Image: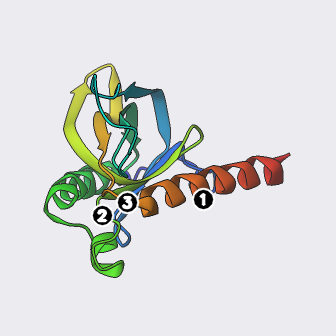
Amino acid sequence: MAITKSFQKYLAVPSAIISDGITTVPLWAVTAMTLNENYHLPAIGSSGAKTVVSTHDDSISLSGVLVGTERYAWKLALENLADASKRGSALGTFTGGRVSGLILITSMTIRTDMQVQSLSFNVSASKRDVIDVSISLDYMPLPGSLGKLLDTAAVGIAALVDWGGN
């Protein structure tokens, strides 16, 4: 029996990273990503006083592939992260519940407080040693100013990463 090696180069930067603070899954080949932001209009006749509530709903859809011999371990880790995003993640434990859900890092956005809404896997004979994965995540920040602060910090980090890469 021949031993096969993965064709994945693990020294490259992954296209996306999903983590709960402990378990981290790199998605090396994201083939498509969509960020949807739906903004809420204030109720007709509402007062001028505003409370700190979410003004928009964000969702992110990723399509990619799990490659190499580790693909089954990445698949299991993604399933566990999807479950943890609903039940409570390690990130929520570390922050005393002030931040919960998953962390998503991509070239487009860095988000905390993400929950997996759907996760699907597909294999085909035309792509050997590959599992296609589709993930839909919703941004579910807790009410308050911490979510806005984390959003601002994420933009700063993304800018630094882009600046450092040039």
Label number found at residue 100: 2
Q: Give the quarter of the image for residue 58.
A: top left
Q: Which of 21 and 122 is in front in this view?
A: 21
The location of residue 23, given as percent across then percent down, is 34, 67
Residue 105 appears in the figure: no
Q: Which amino acid does the dot numbered 1 rest on? A: Ala
Label number found at residue 144: 3
Gap in Å between the C-alphas at discs 3 and 2? 13 Å
Q: What element carries label 1?
A: helix
Q: Is mark 2 on a helix, strand or loop?
A: loop
Q: Tag 1 or tag 2, which sits nearer the N-term?
A: 2
Gap in Å between the C-alphas at discs 2 and 1? 16 Å
Crowd around label 2: few <14 · some 14–19 · many ≥20 (10 Å): many
Asked if residue 138 is positioned above or below residue 76 in the image, the reply reads above
Asked if marks 2 and 1 touch (Cβ < 8 Å), the reply is: no
The location of residue 1, given as percent across then percent down, is 30, 52
Foreground: disc 3 or disc 2 = 3
Crowd around label 1: few <14 · some 14–19 · many ≥20 (10 Å): some
The location of residue 33, given as percent across then percent down, is 45, 28
Label number found at residue 107: none
Q: Is mark 3 on a helix, strand or loop?
A: loop
Asked if residue 144 is positioned above or below residue 45 in the image, the reply reads below
Which quadrant, please, contains the C terminus? top right
Q: Which residue is drawn at 75% across and 46% down?
A: 162
Find disc 1 in the rendering and name its residue: 153
Q: Which amino acid does the dot numbered 3 rest on? A: Gly
Left or right, 123 with reference to 48:
left
Q: Tag 2 or tag 3, which sits nearer the N-term?
A: 2
Q: Which amino acid does the dot numbered 2 rest on? A: Ser
Q: Which of 135 and 77 is in front in this view?
A: 135
Gap in Å between the C-alphas at discs 1 and 3? 15 Å
The location of residue 38, given as percent across then percent down, is 37, 26
